[in-house]
Amino acid sequence: MHRRHFIASAAALTSSVAAPTVWAQSTPKLTPLKFTLDFRVTGQTAPFFLAQQKGYYREEGLEVSIDVGAGSVASITRIASGVYHMGLGDISSLIEFHAQNTGTPLVQAVYQYYNRAPFVIIGRKDRGITSDFASLKGKRVAAAAVEATRRAWPMVARKLRMPDDHFAWSTTDFSARDNVMVRGDVDAATYFHDSAVSLFARMKTEELSILKYTDAGVNLYGNAILASNAMVTQNPGLVAAFLRATNRALQETLANPQPAMAAIKQREPILDEKIELERWRLTAQYVAAADTRSHGLGDVRKYLLEQQVDQVSEVFGLKNRPSAEGVFNRTVLPSIADRTLKA
């Protein structure tokens, strides 16, 4: 059933959302919604483009535009400023943002996309690195100056009772990370697991050890769909409509990813569908992680989110501890029946 006549009109490119306006069912006008990715178009975010291509957003009464991003902090800032209505960004970055901007939350997570953060350190076996984090002792690990996997390392170190300086960081630009690994300039590097397909195309996987933060018992939520507080409080129907359409496309992508890969290929013709399919297969392990079997896609366990708030507050030295309820708002989630994993 089309829900277009239930969707309220949102003011474009402003920090506030217009008061609800009811459209007659026969009115074809769609409500514009600007969405920002956290990075460029890849297989990691293919479900959004599938929803767009197959008209799921339009069926919900939305005219959705999707733009590339410049990192989670940029996504949060774009939404907080009102330039974008919704976007994709890291939960830990959102926790930090809340601590720095107290009071009524400007931005909230409304759908947990990555049920677990895909943080890994990938090491060269010929440098003595195994699947044990202890094998990183004294090694050189490449990472960008400010990136989520690097910043979260102290959480792993404390969990495993290792010093924060268990190894030496080698600050390396994202674009050069694969090169320094292939050349052997470093012993290991940080990655989002699903972003490492570029490295796997240049080095045999049997030559590499993949150390997952989740294997160390550090269960962090990763990127979530974010929305401005104004959107959630003044026009929740619009947010809920976007989430319904996205959740529908996500379920389909988990069941059969090929159409979603074709959708991103249409958006970015330069992409290699085979590479992006492999990227998605890695992404799916973190999107549909074990927790989703019990509470469905898109939701969180309160105690795990509270633990993450505590860990981020301690490691990042935050003066204010945000509340888990302020960070994640589950009131606009699709029904549990729709979010129950079907793949």
Image (cartoon, rainbow, N blue to C red):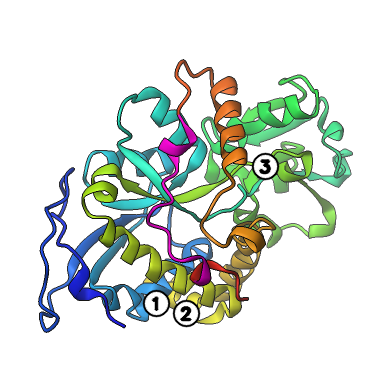
> Residue 79 versus residue 2: which sits nearer the camera?
2
The Cα atoms of the two marked residues, 3 and 2, are separated by 32 Å
* Quadrant of the snapshot with the N terminus: bottom left
Residue 139 in percent (x, y) is at 79, 29
Tell how many labels. 3
Q: Main secondary structure of the magenta part?
A: loop
Q: Is residue 272 visible?
A: no
Residue in the foreground of this view, choosing between 101 and 282: 101
Using the numbered discs, state the Cα–Cα distance from disc 1 to disc 3 in whole angstroms.
35 Å
Of the two numbered discs 3 and 2 on the same chain, state the one appearing first in sequence.
3
Q: Residue at x 29, y 43 (%)?
A: 229
Q: Secondary structure at mark 1?
A: helix
318 with respect to 30 (left or right): right
Highlighted magenta segment, given as a residue range: 323-337
Q: Which residue is mark 2?
A: 262
Could you tell me the amino acid type at mark 3?
Asn
User: In the drawing, what numbered circle is on residue 266?
Assistant: 1
Q: Residue at x 49, y 76 (%)?
A: 260
Q: How dense is the environment of label 3, judged by Cα within 10 Å: few (below 14), some, or many (20 and up)?
A: some
Q: Is residue 318 left or right of residue 7?
A: right
Query: If you read the primary sequence from the N terminus, does the residue marked by circle 1 or circle 3 appear first?
Result: 3
Question: Is residue 279 placed above or below 126 in the rendered structure?
Answer: below
Mark 1 or mark 3, whichever is nearer to me: 3
Q: Is residue 136 left or right of residue 98?
A: right
- 173 sits to left or right of 71: right
Q: Are marks 1 and 2 in contact (CB under 8 Å)?
A: yes
Under circle 3, the secondary element is loop
Q: Depth check: 157 or 99 in front?
A: 99
**Whole-percent x and y of residue 77?**
31, 38
Q: Amino acid at mark 1?
A: Gln
Q: Which mark is residue 219?
A: 3
Q: Secondary structure at mark 2?
A: helix
